[in-house]
Amino acid sequence: MHTNQTMSEQDILTDLLAMEKQIISSYNTGITEASCPNLRKTLTNSLVGTQQMQFTIFDNMHKQGWYPTKNAPSQDVTNAQNKYSNVKNQL
């Protein structure tokens, strides 16, 4: 039996967002494991494009109220910046 079910715009965007996140994760793994500079550059360029697409999808969902977020308190942002700056400096 075949049913004709269509996905809502929200369902489609949710699916696309999940796929973009998975692709980003895969690019990150590929970049960290690639020893060829040309391959790393190609993967990095693809990663940036995928991150931009992911943000476009996220932003659209957020504006529609389908992906609610809350703003981080400014002190939390400062603490995170300091934490990761310290980690970077230790490396």
Image (cartoon, rainbow, N blue to C red):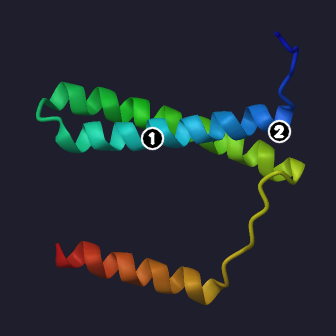
Which picture quadrant has residue 30?
A: top left
* Label 2 Cα neighbours within 10 Å, binned few <14 / some 14-19 / many ≥20: some
- Taking depth in this image into account, of 10 and 52 the one nearest to the observer is 10
Residue 33 position within the rendered picture, expressed as x and y whole percent measured from the top left:
18, 40
In the displayed orientation, state which residue is furthest to the left. 35
- Taking depth in this image into account, of 85 and 20 the one nearest to the observer is 20
Residue lying at 86% horizontally and 15% vertically, measured from the top left: 3
Residue lying at 60% horizontally and 41% vertically, measured from the top left: 18
- Taking depth in this image into account, of 51 and 1 the one nearest to the observer is 1
Q: Quadrant of the N terminus?
A: top right
Q: Quadrant of the C terminus?
A: bottom left
Residue lying at 70% horizontally and 46% vertically, measured from the top left: 58
In the displayed orientation, state which residue is furthest to the front. 1
Residue 66 position within the rendered picture, expressed as x and y whole percent measured from the top left:
83, 51
Q: Amino acid at mark 2?
A: Gln
Looking at marks 1 and 2 on the same chain, the residue that comes earlier in the sequence is marked by 2
In the displayed orientation, state which residue is furthest to the bottom. 75
> Which residue is tagged 2?
10
Q: Amino acid at mark 1?
A: Ile
- Measured in 3D between alpha carbons, the distance from the residue under mark 1 to the one under mark 2, in whole angstroms, is 21 Å
> Which residue is tagged 1?
24
Q: Secondary structure at mark 2?
A: helix
**Is residue 86 shown left or right of residue 74?**
left
